[in-house]
Image (spheres, rainbow, N blue to C red):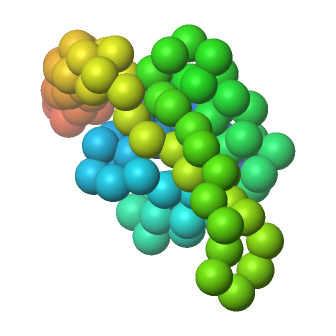
Amino acid sequence: MDQERRAQWLRGVLDLCVLALLRRRESYGYELSQALRAHGLGSVQGGTLYPVLLRLQRSGLVTAHWREGETGPARKYYRISPAGSATLRTAGTDWTAFAASVGAIMSEEPMR
């Protein structure tokens, strides 16, 4: 896949993807990055992910707290808030409809 195209698409949905991952369980940045990669979104660097997490935190969609590491330094864990869950429900529905519309256009036969 073209990396520039992937990056452009990802900018539009990264917030939703992060909220969806946090809906499953609280997590820290590196773990979120690995989960995004495991789901086929490629490498999401900290310079991209941490501003998203900060924006989500400032807007009240996630909460954060520090937890001491068992073998390493403390980690900042993020958890989806009730407002984040509500946003994810609404935006997730909107995204599904939008993606279906794009899919329908892409699968149409060309005009002759």
**Residue beneath the point at 70% across and 87% down:** 71
Using residue 39 as the reference point, say whether residue 1 is left or right of it.
Answer: right
Q: Position of residue 15 (x, y in %)?
A: 50, 30
Q: Position of residue 64 (x, y in %)?
A: 57, 38
**Residue beneath the point at 82% across and 45% down:** 47
Q: Nearer the viewer, residue 102 or 67?
A: 67
In this picture, is 48 found above or below 25?
A: above
Using residue 106 as the reference point, say whether residue 80 is left or right of it.
Answer: right
**Residue beneath the point at 25% across and 17% down:** 86
Q: Nearer the viewer, residue 66 or 29?
A: 66
Using residue 80 as the reference point, say whether residue 106 is left or right of it.
Answer: left
Q: Quadrant of residue 106?
A: top left
In this picture, is 33 found above or below 54?
A: below
In this picture, is 10 found above or below 67?
A: above
Using residue 77 as the reference point, say whether residue 46 is left or right of it.
Answer: right
**Residue 78 in view of the camera:** yes
Count all numbered tags in the image, as a single digit: 0
In this picture, is 3 found above or below 7?
A: below
**Residue beneath the point at 37% across and 27% down:** 81
Q: Position of residue 33 (x, y in %)?
A: 59, 59
Name, please, the residue furthest toward the bottom. 71
Q: Position of residue 2 (x, y in %)?
A: 64, 52
**Residue 2 in view of the camera:** no
Where does the C terminus fall, quadrant-wise?
top left
Q: Quadrant of residue 93?
A: top left
Where does the N terminus fall, quadrant-wise?
bottom right
